[in-house]
Amino acid sequence: MKFTDVTEDISFYIKTYGCQMNFHDSELLEDGLIFKGFKKASSLNDANIIILNTCSVRDNADHKILSDIGRIDKNKKIILAGCYAQQKIRQNANINANANKNANTDTIIYVSINKNKSEIRQNTNTHINTNTALNTYVNINKNKNEAENNNAAIFLRESENKELSVNYYVSPEAFLSIPDMLEKEFKSLLKLKKAAVYSDINLTDSGNLESVTNKNNNIITTNNIKYVQKLDYEHHNNNEFKKDKKDIDILANNENYYKRLEKSFNDRSEKKDLLNYMQYLKITEGCNNFCSYCIVPYVRGAEKYIPLNILLKTVEKYAQKNVKEIILLGQNVNSYKSPESSSYNFAYLLKKIAEIKNINKIKFLTSHPKDMSDEVIELIGRENKISKSLHLPVQSGSDRILKLMNRGYDRNHYLDLIKKIKSSCQDISLSTDVIVGFPGETDEDFELTLSLIKEIGFEFIYGFQYSPRPFTTALNYKDDIPLKIKKERLNRLFELQKNIFALSLNKLIGNYYDVIMEKISENDDYNSEIIAKGILYKGITSNERAVYLKNFDIKKISALLSNSVSEKSESNLVAGRVKITEVVSNKLYGEVIY
């Protein structure tokens, strides 16, 4: 179906890449679009509007996104959103900024937006370099009253960058505005045929784009024009950031962002049907850490903390809609401090959610080792509702590499942290992230990483080969580790982890565990062999280990099931006790104790 053929039924399809936060955002966006009257298509081919919610943490994600865009029918409306969209926006802005340092000038057009109409007027007193592929259009509100009524914006027009045949670029901060954006577009019967980029922008009186703020959320849809967002972190190196961290606009001007997010949470909680038993909940967005390899601060921006009252109201509403498990999300959940009061920190949030009736389990990711507090560690061990599984990225076991990565801790600090965690919670299951082949990593550095993994005994490791990312400090380092060595190190890492995991699982044979039993998803490829054996249920322990149940008998357990919420939810859930009987292919198998 062509976009130009749309009459009444306007359908959308969202494809999501990357982290759990992206999937969470996509769920909220889907709710918002359906609430506006758009219809969810069953496949990409059936949709009029394609929304790509993208990731840019590694370069292989970039290649996948570009490949997918190239295969989409160009008659469809394509919205490139999320981190990769913001990466492209920044790259275009940087090209323009560098080009403007040179000579030739020409007339600039100013565009101002008010509530009723768009006005385009020419100002011949201001000039800009046009000896570049990008021509800049800027609105400068010199009149104070006009500035209060209008939404200032900056645009880039692309005459090159042909590889991206998309209609909109949407920054992560503006992601949940897509339903309003599309509603306004279709109400106005606008038919865009060339690229337009949408995001929230603020200009200074001099016309310089300094920091991300949220104004009136007006949208400009002009042929061949792009909105461009520039984050407040540009040109900050790590030392500069530490000096003026308090001046970074973390909490100011976020009112519209909070309102959009609260509305999205409310839309989800007010759906007619009961929700799935597990729900994600974003508590922070952005990052202040500037690890030298990481693009996140440059595409997600400074840390924003969702107000405590919004989070608690949302969890209470979710609990009334069948939700039993909450997964709190953030680039660094440990740094959470509610805008309402700095005393409302992450530990306080965990305690308040644990008090909410009907919420049985609380998980969270991701944690940063330098911000993991003793209060949170103590709470993990003491509070039964908090999952006994913790993901704590280490990245490297070498102090030299950790310093180059700007991680903010050393090997001993991390090991001491693990000792505290294991002392607080003996059943804790630990997982981590490791980057191999970081610039300058020697064989000795890598061996230190392997020795740390052996000493700690992680159950899961997410390993990655280093890949240079735009804007990051590490981009200035020589990427001197050959791809062959990166692959060899990654294979050694995974082989070591496989052996550690097998050993830890075999120690569990004969043990008894309380679990939550649930039906295995038929669409889960990871469990396809298990389903083929006739095993349809698994039990999840408090530390998130899966136990596949060989003797699950629906008749024997029907009484328990009838008293549970399972018949009204998307998953069959019931509490029970199991005994571990064997380990096959690094999977636990057990029997239900009736």
Image (tube, helix red, strand yellow):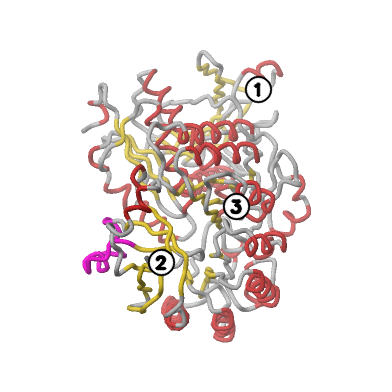
The tag earlier along the polypeptide, 1 or 3, is 1
- The answer to whether residue 583 of the structure is visible from this angle is yes
The residue drawn where x is 33% and y is 78% is: 585
At mark 3, the secondary structure is helix
Residue in front for this viewpoint, 292 or 206 = 292
Number of the label disc, if any, that sits on residue 297: 3
- Find residue 319 and name its label: none
Mark before the other along the chain sequence, 3 or 2: 3
Residue at left 57%, top 37%? 104
Magenta-tinted stretch: 522-537
For badge 1, the amino acid type reads Asn
Q: Residue 393: image x %, image y %?
A: 57, 67
Q: Which residue is mark 2?
A: 546
Give the residue type at disc 2.
Answer: Ala
Say whether residue 501 is visible. Answer: no
Find disc 1 in the rendering and name its residue: 141
In the rendered image, residue 41 lying in the magenta stretch gets the answer no
Q: CA distance from mark 3 to mark 2?
A: 34 Å
> For residue 591, what is the image quadrant?
bottom left
- Relative vertical location of residue 291 with respect to residue 346 in this rendering, above or below: below
Give the structural element (helix, strand or loop) at label 2. strand
What amino acid is labelled 3 in the image?
A: Pro
Q: Residues within 10 Å of mark 3 (few under 14, many from 20)?
A: many
Q: Earlier in the sequence, mark 2 or mark 1?
A: 1
393 versus 220 height, above or below: below
Q: Looking at the image, which residue is at 60% across and 31% down?
A: 256
Which image quadrant for residue 115? top right
Asked if residue 591 lies left or right of residue 497, the reply is: left
